[in-house]
Amino acid sequence: MSTPGPDHQRLIRKLQTIYHLTPEDEAAIGRLPLRNKDVGEGADVVREGDTPNECCLLLDGFLCRYKLVADGARQILSFHISGDIPDLQSLHLKVMDHSLGALTSCRLAFIPHEALAALMRERPNVAAACWRDTLIDAAVFREWLAGVGRRNAHQRIAHLLCEVYVRLASVDLAPDRTFAFPATQVELGDALGLSAVHVNRVLQDLRRDGLIVSKGRLTHVPDWSRLAAAGDFDDTYLHLRVAA
Amino acid sequence: MPKYFFHTEGRDEYLDEEGLELESHQAARIEAARMLGEMLRDNAHAFWTARSLKLVVSDASGMILFALDLSGIESPAVRRLRVGG
């Protein structure tokens, strides 16, 4: 049984955070055909209305799901990190009801729908893991809805930083509680229903209070429990196999 | 793009030391209005203690460009009731 390559490992590592996969499951994932593609910052990977016949595995960089409403205003619906397949639902939902955009330059790998469907028939564990992933997706939306509806600006931003940190940490991308989260203030505002001015001010406040420390382009969390308290954050909704 | 600084005056005084790049005065005006609305939404009950919320926008040189000034006003009748009993 050959070891899956580094690109496949990103998917395996992510799925292992939410479901137990056996070595045979991992080997089968390792045999998925991947079509590699690089995209630049700001590019659309898939657009609302598209009918893709492949899924996009994010290898490196950050993607976001978003929708544009009638006057052209953008709502960012979720952020995605290495190992995520943000459009996995396209396997069953033929028409995209949202767009997938690159927040940074990204390395992507496209997987044909037939190959994913065949893998899931062959390995029921992998099918269960993918199902669980989309269920957790829904849990994240529920949490975001509660936040955008009822949390104040300070809590919204702290909560999002907590979520991003926990997700990055689960795939070993936040050593020493330090991570890259390259969303701009406008993008944070578009995700959290806040004006960029407000995002700017809250980030200043978080830094002044020592809840986050900027280290170049990286963010460091000196005291996790303080940031979690500020964000009213409880990681249950992420349903990770190993809690933060 | 020019930088704009959004300060709060009054009870919860805040001096914006970083500023934000926006396209134009018009964009800054719109963002200021949005910001005021969000601040009011987040602190609706605290607003009635101070009964005033003021947002001041300046440019990079420190010159004030515009201000948003919100006041909560009680009618004399309500004020009498509140003070009296």
Image (spheres, coloured by chain):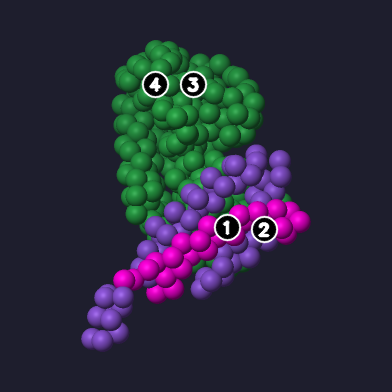
Chain colours: A green, B purple
Q: Does the magenta portion include A16? A: no
Q: Residue at horizontal 42%, vertical 30%?
A: A69
Have a look at marks 1 and 2 and say if they share a chain: yes
Question: Mark 1 near mark 2, Cβ–Cβ under 8 Å?
Answer: yes
Image-based side of A28 in relation to A82, left or right: left
Tell me which amino acid carries mark 2.
Answer: Ile
Residue under label 3, please give it.
A46
Between disc 4 and disc 2, the foreground one is: 2
Which amino acid type corresponds to the residue marked 1 in the rendered image? Ala
* Marks 1 and 4 share the same chain: no
- Contact check, label 4 and label 3, Cβ < 8 Å: yes
State the SS at label 2: strand
Contact, mark 3 vs mark 1 (Cβ under 8 Å): no
Q: Secondary structure at mark 4?
A: loop
Toward the bottom, the furthest residue is B84
Magenta residues, start to end: B49-75
Residue at figure coordinates x 41%, y 17% from the top left: A49
As rendered, which of A213 and A113 lies closer to the eye? Answer: A213
Disc 2 crowd rating (10 Å Cα; few below 14, some 14-19, many 20+) is: some
Label 3 SS? strand
- The disc numbered 2 marks a residue on which chain? B
The label number, if any, that marks residue B67 in the structure image: 1
Q: Report crowding for label 1: few under 14, some 14 to 19, many 20 or more residues within 10 A (C-alpha).
A: some
Residue most extreme to the front: B76
Please state which amino acid type lies under the numbered disc 3.
Answer: Val
Residue B2, how many percent across, how many down? 71, 45
The C terminus of chain A - image quarter: bottom left
Task: Specify the amino acid type for callout 4.
Answer: Met
